[in-house]
Image: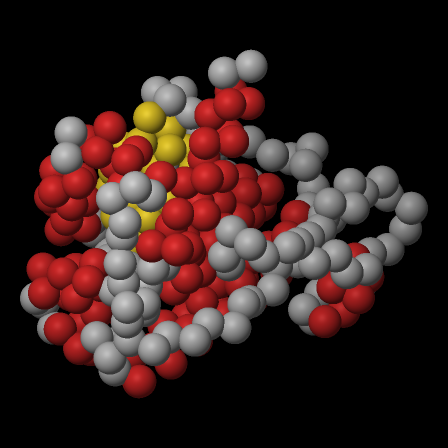
């Protein structure tokens, strides 16, 4: 999902029926908190990824979205009274929910901020000025971001605005999504799952990273910086 997408609301009963889940029985109280996320249509013009690779990755995004919607519907009727930290259906669903949401939205943001064949960054842009401010130089940001990408285990490298630190930092997220610091807004997202690059680059992760960074969509990224600045103002009170 991209950061511009709007949440789609659908009747809970219809969601459960569409997902093949059994209808609720009795008058047991429910939270009715189901939500549905919908995929965005991405136009990936880049030749840095093959057409088969693009299709496979877009298919994977659809699978993540389908899984998130299924978990959301199941959480609407799960038994919360039996929840515990050792093993329970509620705990498993909540973990799956967090993983699925991270995977769906980060993948969507990744597709949104790549594939710009005319990739350009102006020195007077907010993106450039903030990266220079918090990393010393733009080159330092690039080097740090690339190091994060090469350090990721089938996950993501992400430049985020950390509202606790009130600055921009690069983070490493592994496939299990356990290393996601809270109170962070994603700005630049690079997918480092083997399924994203192996078909075209085999194990040459560095060449893949350089290829993606050559075509970053700085217009999209600039919009995220502007949103982050609004977050910073709110956090500052």
Q: Is residue 184 something that shows in the picture?
A: yes
Residue at the (46%, 72%) spot, across then down: 42
> Residue 214, percent across and down?
19, 62
Q: Is residue 97 above or below residue 195?
A: above
Q: Count up the numbered dots.
A: 0
Residue at the (55%, 67%) spot, across then down: 39
Residue at the (18%, 50%) spot, across then down: 149
- Which is nearer the eye, 171 or 155? 171
Q: Is residue 168 above or below residue 53?
A: above
Going by the image, does 202 lie left or right of 236? Answer: left
Going by the image, does 199 lie left or right of 236? Answer: left
Q: How is the image coloured?
A: secondary structure
Which image quadrant is residue 166 in?
top left
Q: Residue furthest front?
A: 124
> Residue 70, percent across and down?
61, 60
> Residue 83, percent across and down?
60, 34
Residue at the (33%, 43%) spot, across then down: 125
Q: Is residue 155 something that shows in the picture?
A: no
Q: Is residue 81 above or below residue 234?
A: below
Going by the image, does 84 lie left or right of 75? Answer: left
- Which is nearer the eye, 74 or 33? 33
Q: Residue furthest top?
A: 237
Q: Residue furthest bottom?
A: 52
Quadrant in which the C terminus appears: top right
Which image quadrant is residue 211 in?
bottom left
């Amino acid at each position: 999902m991209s950061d511009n997408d709007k949440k789609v609301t659908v009747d809970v009963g219809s969601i459960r029926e569409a997902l093949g889940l059994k209808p609720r029985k009795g008058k047991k109280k429910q939270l009715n908190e189901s939500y549905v996320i919908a995929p965005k249509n991405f136009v990936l013009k880049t030749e840095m990824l093959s057409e088969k690779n693009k299709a496979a990755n877009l298919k994977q995004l659809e699978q993540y979205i389908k899984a998130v919607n299924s978990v959301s519907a199941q959480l609407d009727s799960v038994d919360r009274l039996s929840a515990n930290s050792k093993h329970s259906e509620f705990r498993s669903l909540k973990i799956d929910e967090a993983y699925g949401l991270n995977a769906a939205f980060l993948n969507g943001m990744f597709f949104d901020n790549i594939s710009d064949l005319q990739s350009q960054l102006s020195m007077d842009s907010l993106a450039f000025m903030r990266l220079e401010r918090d990393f010393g130089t733009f080159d330092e940001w690039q080097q740090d971001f690339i190091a994060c990408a090469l350090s990721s285990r089938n996950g993501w490298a992400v430049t985020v605005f950390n509202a606790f630190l009130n600055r921009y930092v690069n983070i490493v997220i592994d496939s299990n999504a356990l290393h996601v610091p809270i109170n962070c807004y994603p700005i630049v997202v690079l997918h480092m799952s083997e399924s994203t690059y192996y078909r075209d680059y085999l194990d040459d992760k560095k060449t893949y990273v350089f290829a993606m960074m050559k075509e970053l969509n700085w217009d999209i990224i600039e919009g995220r910086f502007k949103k982050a600045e609004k977050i910073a103002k709110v956090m500052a009170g």
